[in-house]
Image (cartoon, rainbow, N blue to C red):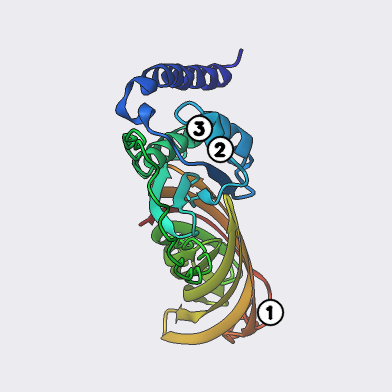
Amino acid sequence: MKPHTARVHGRRLGVGGCTVVLALTWPLSSFAADEVPRHRVELTADRSLPGCSNPFDFSAILTNWLPVSTLDPTATRALVVRIRRLPDGGRSVDTTITDEAGAAVHTEHHDYPPTDDCFKVLYWTAFDAAKRIRELAPPHEEEVAVAPPPSEPAPAPVPAKPAPCPACPPPSKPPAAPTPMRRFVGLGATISRGAAPEWGPGLRLAGGVQLAAFTLELDARWMPLLNTRRAGLSDVDIHTFALTGAGCFKRAPLLGCLLVTGGTVGTVVSSRDYAWRGAGGFFGAGARTAVEFPLSSHLMARVDVEVALSFIGARLDFFGPSPWELLIPVATGGGSLLYAF
């Protein structure tokens, strides 16, 4: 048996053991004597979490603490559970309990780390939900002692006219759980070809906002050219500064983006007799793809590759047309560390 499989089975056996102990000790508590109203179970999960979207497994776990008769698909009360995948690979669980009119009487939110599998998430969600259902159960009415019948029958009272039943309000839908918004900042290194005549390394400072599966990113890059290019009898140093904005679609761990970029290319030409400095602007658009690897609940490593094509070139043509002027694709690759909060 593989070590990973053994760890998974061991963890599930441990959780299963806790289930047996709780199932045996729960009826001894004060909650076991209460009559629990019937509820229907509504469980949904993201497509990327197939192991978390099985309502039959979830209902089976609930029966450790609730009678089987409590779970009724036709009941007016409802237990609504929504499970989402977090950007770092963890799980976000929103639990709502509604009454007969469909109004939410209890809501609860929990985040689980990427190391917890779906079985553990379903187990503890069922445990918390069963406890809340029992706490919200209406109290029992005490039996009223029946008086012995009189020796002579009393005259029957005239029945009062029943009051008209007010119109029942339409059932309201449970409030939708808000989608958490995450921000992040990043620092990394790049290597680029096309922004200058040779391959050149650079620094990247990035930031952005993620809402559900969509991400907006903005990063600044500076690429100094470490080696010198010869142009006749002169030495030429070129460095590039660029700002890039991107809109991305994320489906962990992959990321796809469309971007626009612009900046300046600075040039220093020097020889024995003179020195000349110049700069030119550029603007272009392109695409980016990336892969993210979660290191913790807030820290991620990221590797990305992008290609951009210029629409407005820098026109540094003292030694021939520049790459930005000739619409040569600019290829960039790099790695970054991202901190999400």
Q: Is residue 235 visible?
A: no
Residue 259 in the image: state x and y as whole percent: 58, 73
User: In percent of the image, x 52 and y 66: which residue is there?
Assistant: 215
Which mark is nearer the camera, 3 or 1? 3
- Which residue matches tag 3? 62
User: In percent of the image, x 61 and y 80: which residue is there?
Assistant: 284
User: In percent of the image, x 42 and y 84: which residue is there?
Assistant: 273
- Out of 239 and 298, give the one closest to the viewer: 298
Q: CA distance from mark 3 to mark 1?
A: 63 Å
Amino acid type of the residue tagged 1 in the rendering: Leu
- Which residue matches tag 2? 71
- Which residue matches tag 1? 327
SS class, disc 2: loop
Residue 81 in the image: state x and y as whole percent: 51, 48
Amino acid type of the residue tagged 3 in the rendering: Leu
- Left or right: residue 205 versus residue 86 is left
On-image quarter of the C terminus? bottom left
Answer with the quarter of the image where residue 36 lies.
Answer: top left
> Disc 3, disc 1: CB below 8 Å?
no
Which mark is nearer the camera, 2 or 3? 2
Amino acid type of the residue tagged 2 in the rendering: Leu
Q: Is residue 246 visible?
A: yes
For residue 282, above or below residue 75 = below
Q: CA distance from mark 2 to mark 1?
A: 65 Å
For residue 294, above or below residue 157 = above
Mark nearer the N terminus (2 vs 1): 2
Q: Crowding near pointer 3: few (<14 within 10 Å), some, many (20+)?
A: many
Residue 19 in the image: state x and y as whole percent: 45, 21
- Left or right: residue 183 versus residue 293 is left
